[in-house]
Image: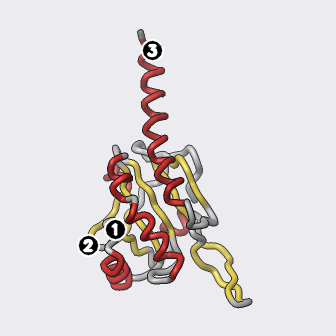
Amino acid sequence: MSVTLGQPVPDFTGQATSNTTVKLSELKGRKVVLFFYPKDNTPGCTSEGQAFRDLYEEFQASDTLVFGVSKDGMKAHENFRAKHEFPFELISDTDESLCKLFDVIKLKQMYGKEYMGIERSTFLIDSNGILQHEWRKVRIKGHVEDVLQAAQMVDTQALAEDNDSKDEEE
């Protein structure tokens, strides 16, 4: 089973930095961004994490939680998070359960060799647990700004829908 746009995301639990457990059902009422990246402390993954860090306050202002996800272990995550002062938690998905749920394990190539690895992807889940947006094969430049704008628009769309239903009731 994998996630589908416009549908509820199945509940999941993941171990994260700061000795926390992330359970989707406990985050209802807030939007959630999950950004999947291949490996801690690599250039692209570092740039992406720093971009989310630099816009973190704006995500908070739009009531959006941000989590990074990779297959790295907790020690690597803790070091990566501390080194780059990420204000968000990193989920360790060593068993690939989240990677499989979000279908981000893909055949990749490096130096002429094929291997299975995480395809850089980001997902936006609304406050009701519905998958609203997905970005696959992410290019980092401008990506985090796009995610932030989408998170802000989810608010706007929800308000417009609420107002439409109130107008119909009157």
N-terminal label among 1 and 3? 1
Is 141 left or right of 115, judged from the image as shown? Answer: left
The residue singled out by tag 1 in the image is 89
Residue at 30 percent of width and 78 percent of height = 82
Quarter of the C terminus within the rendering: top left
Viewer-side residue, 120 vs 14: 120
CB-based contact (under 8 Å), mark 3 and mark 2: no
Quarter of the N terminus within the rendering: bottom right
Is 18 left or right of 29, judged from the image as shown? Answer: left
Q: What's the residue type where badge 1 is placed?
A: Glu
Q: Count neighbours of disc 2 (C-alpha within 10 A) and say few if under 14, some if 14 to 19, many if 20 or more.
A: few
Marks 3 and 2, how far apart at CA: 45 Å
**Camera sees residue 112:** yes
The residue singled out by tag 2 in the image is 18
CB-based contact (under 8 Å), mark 2 and mark 1: yes
Assign a secondary structure to mark 2.
loop
